[in-house]
Image: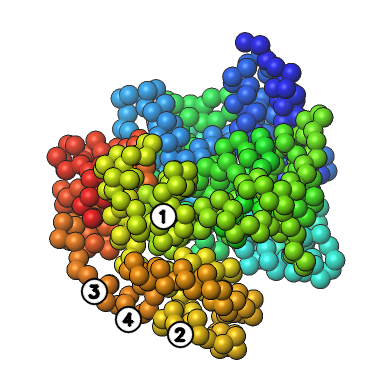
């Protein structure tokens, strides 16, 4: 297969960037890249080399296990190699890992795992002889590490003498040194006070601390240690047969073992552990970026063995990255419902914090210039406030040749009007009120989940309605007819009926949601709730003075001025009257009357299980709808389960449900029951 020049350049750039990052981290102790970013770039290089094996070279970062030990420490060879772990980035990859090892070990018990939190620190190896600590070393390249015994001795959770009456001739323990979050914050406060550079994160601080030449400094930083692997002489009578028993043995002889471990009898229980800690880890006093899954049986581990780089019997399942790298395919502008023209980066799809991201905001022309972002660039993206993807920085070392600086347009791409940049604002705007983008944005916002929550009225359907002149404003939505919608492209009678049902149901939404749906500038859904609570009707809000609005706790001058100005506009007041006429709720009293509903008799008291990916609902949304209707959602199948809701790529739950003859529902059937 011919490898293009662009592809060869990309592979070479990735190698250089990864090697530079490894050298900075392992040798210079000056990290230049987040771990999640390194993992993603490494995965991209690995994928390209797999597709084009003729490009693999011996000096590629994918062709070695670890990195060179730092020069200022004595190198020591590990008695037992420290292998790195294969990474999985979602539950599907975890299932594929299980399929791989099961093919190699058909006669073994396939349902026993040990789950442990993957601590974000530095791996170290400890050697004991006759019960006494004689050496501590870093992982290094997995075969050779740096001897840092004096520093290791300062870690209080590492015993210098084991609590054994008859200790073995030697014993090896592996584990993770880490900095508790409070200690990390204390160290950075001191460094800031002393005008020293701050540590980027606890992991980097741990690595830097372990490589200190002065053990007194290490002692002051109060590192902690969790033990997770035990090696004893093969013939030793107390040699545990399983990973779970090894952890108990380590705890018994004086080591700190993470209490948040779990013995799992199935992959489903592993997934439950993973899902639980994805949220619960925020409450931990240390950082964890995933879980480690190991087969419990040492006999099975020995049978499976190792690949060139990884044990086949263990895997690290990472949580979605807070930041990730990707490539920019295009730069476009998006015109929002307020006329704001926002530059957007269109990128290669990348998983980020639980979703697949293809677009990221570049905010405004000032941010665009600051980033100096260009088509073809490799960029780091993150979710601002864990919601909106944004570009954090550009990796200019990976920039292709002959790229061009991007220029913001002078005219609106939607209506052709000349764009303006208001004084004291960084945002370029289209000021044409009839601009199709502004109308479209207003309707999409009105139908959004936090506003009127009109399910099925997404961007594509809104564009279809506008294209066919079915709607020109919010009010037109409530004058649509089923037959009118059914005649549209990709629509039919059933789809049209479902959409009209959702539109009519939106009339039941409370006053606060209607207020938010109006799209008044600066009024978010929380502000709308505050305003609706203090002004029980649209009449009270529209007649409020600027001073009264500013006097509401939580409503600042900017929001108050925006609300006051909006209600002084005669076109806006006319819109309110038209929406009231079709049945929308503009007072608290109307809302309370509409909400006096009974539970859904089809759902009440029933137990549901969700499996696979639903096409329109997120699992959390489906769960909320079922519970609001009086049902209950559980994570596992049992004889008590009434229904299993089946999405795409359904997992093992579906097979168990079939065995128990539990009734299956598609997403459409669930929505019908809810309706």
- Depth check: 456 or 292 in front? 456
Mark linked to residue 596: 3
- Depth check: 238 or 485 in front? 485
Secondary structure found at label 4: helix
Secondary structure found at label 2: helix
Which is nearer the N-term, disc 3 or disc 1? Answer: 1
Q: Which class describes the residues within 10 Å of circle 2: few (<14), some (14-19), or many (20+)?
A: few
Q: Is residue 622 left or right of residue 85?
A: left
Residue underneath mark 1: 276
Which is nearer the N-term, disc 2 or disc 1? Answer: 1
- Depth check: 232 or 467 in front? 467
Q: Which class describes the residues within 10 Å of circle 3: few (<14), some (14-19), or many (20+)?
A: few
- Depth check: 141 or 577 in front? 577
Residue 521 visible in the current orientation: yes
Mark linked to residue 589: 4
Residue 252 visible in the current orientation: no
Mark 4 vs mark 3, CA separation in Å: 11 Å
Which is nearer the N-term, disc 2 or disc 4? Answer: 2
Mark 2 vs mark 4, CA separation in Å: 13 Å
Mark 2 vs mark 3, CA separation in Å: 24 Å
Q: Nearer the viewer, mark 4 or mark 1?
A: 4
Secondary structure found at label 3: loop
Which is nearer the N-term, disc 4 or disc 3? Answer: 4
Image x and y of residue 232, in percent: 51, 39
Secondary structure found at label 1: helix
Mark 3 vs mark 1, CA separation in Å: 35 Å
Tell me the quadrant of the picture where the C terminus can be found.
bottom left
Q: Nearer the viewer, mark 2 or mark 3?
A: 2
Please say if 518 is above or below 116.
below
Residue 2 falls in which quadrant of the image? top right
């Amino acid at each position: 297969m011919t490898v293009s020049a662009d592809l060869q350049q990309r592979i070479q750039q990735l190698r250089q960037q990864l090697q530079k990052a490894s050298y900075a981290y392992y040798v210079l102790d000056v990290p230049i890249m987040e771990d999640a970013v390194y993992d993603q770039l490494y995965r991209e290089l690995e994928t390209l080399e797999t597709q084009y094996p003729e490009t693999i070279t011996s000096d590629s970062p994918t062709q070695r296990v670890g990195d060179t030990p730092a020069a200022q420490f004595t190198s020591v060879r590990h008695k037992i190699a420290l292998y790195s772990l294969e990474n999985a980035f979602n539950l599907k990859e975890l299932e594929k890992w299980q399929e791989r090892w099961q093919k190699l070990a058909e006669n073994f018990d396939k349902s026993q795992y040990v789950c442990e939190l993957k601590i974000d620190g530095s791996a170290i190896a400890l050697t004991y002889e006759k019960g006494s600590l004689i050496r501590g070393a870093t992982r290094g390249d997995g075969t050779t590490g740096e001897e840092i015994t004096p520093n290791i001795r300062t870690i209080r959770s590492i015993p210098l003498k084991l609590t054994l009456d008859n200790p073995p001739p030697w014993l090896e323990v592996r584990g993770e040194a880490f900095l508790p979050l409070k200690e990390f914050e204390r160290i950075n406060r001191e460094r800031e006070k002393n005008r020293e550079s701050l540590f980027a994160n606890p992991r980097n601080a741990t690595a830097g601390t372990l490589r200190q030449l002065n053990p007194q400094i290490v002692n002051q930083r109060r590192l902690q240690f969790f033990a997770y692997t035990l090696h004893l002489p093969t013939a030793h009578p107390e040699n545990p047969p399983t990973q779970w028993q090894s952890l108990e043995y380590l705890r018994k002889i004086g080591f700190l073992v993470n209490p948040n471990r779990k013995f799992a009898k199935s992959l489903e229980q592993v997934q439950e552990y993973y899902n639980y800690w994805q949220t619960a880890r925020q409450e931990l006093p240390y950082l964890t970026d995933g879980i480690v899954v190991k087969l419990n049986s040492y006999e099975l581990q020995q049978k499976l063995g190792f690949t060139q780089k990884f044990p086949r019997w263990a895997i690290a399942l990472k949580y979605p990255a807070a930041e990730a790298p990707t490539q920019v395919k295009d730069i476009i502008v998006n015109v929002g419902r307020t006329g704001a023209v926002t530059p957007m980066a269109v990128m290669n799809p990348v998983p980020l914090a639980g979703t697949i991201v293809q677009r990221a905001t570049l905010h405004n022309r000032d941010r665009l210039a600051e980033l100096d972002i260009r088509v073809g660039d490799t960029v780091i993206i993150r979710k601002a406030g864990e919601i909106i993807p944004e570009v954090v920085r550009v990796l200019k070392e990976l920039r292709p040749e002959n790229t061009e600086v991007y220029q913001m347009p002078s005219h609106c791409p939607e209506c052709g009007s000349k764009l303006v940049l208001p004084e004291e604002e960084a945002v370029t705007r289209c000021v044409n009120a009839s601009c199709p983008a502004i109308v479209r944005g207003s309707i999409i916002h009105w139908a959004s989940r936090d506003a009127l929550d009109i399910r099925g009225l997404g961007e594509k359907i809104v564009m279809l309605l506008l294209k066919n002149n079915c709607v020109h404003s919010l009010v037109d939505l409530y004058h649509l007819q089923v037959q009118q919608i059914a005649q549209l492209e990709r629509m039919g009678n059933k789809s049209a009926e479902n959409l009209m049902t959702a539109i009519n149901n939106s009339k039941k939404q409370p006053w606060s949601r209607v207020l938010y749906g109006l799209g008044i500038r600066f009024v978010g859904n929380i502000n709308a709730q505050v305003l609706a609570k203090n002004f029980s009707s649209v009449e009270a809000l529209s007649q409020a003075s600027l001073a009264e609005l500013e006097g509401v706790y939580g409503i600042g001058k900017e929001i108050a001025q925006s609300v006051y100005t909006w209600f002084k506009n005669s076109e806006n007041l006319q819109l309110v009257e038209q929406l009231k006429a079709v049945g929308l709720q503009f007072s608290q009293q109307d809302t309370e009357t509409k909400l006096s509903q009974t539970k859904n008799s089809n759902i009440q008291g029933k137990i549901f299980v969700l499996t696979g990916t639903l096409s329109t609902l997120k699992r959390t949304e489906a769960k909320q709808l079922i519970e609001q209707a009086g049902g209950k959602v559980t994570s596992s199948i049992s004889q008590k389960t009434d229904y299993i809701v089946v999405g795409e790529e359904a997992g093992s739950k579906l097979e168990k449900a079939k065995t128990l003859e539990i009734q299956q529902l598609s997403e459409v059937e669930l929505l019908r029951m809810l309706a």
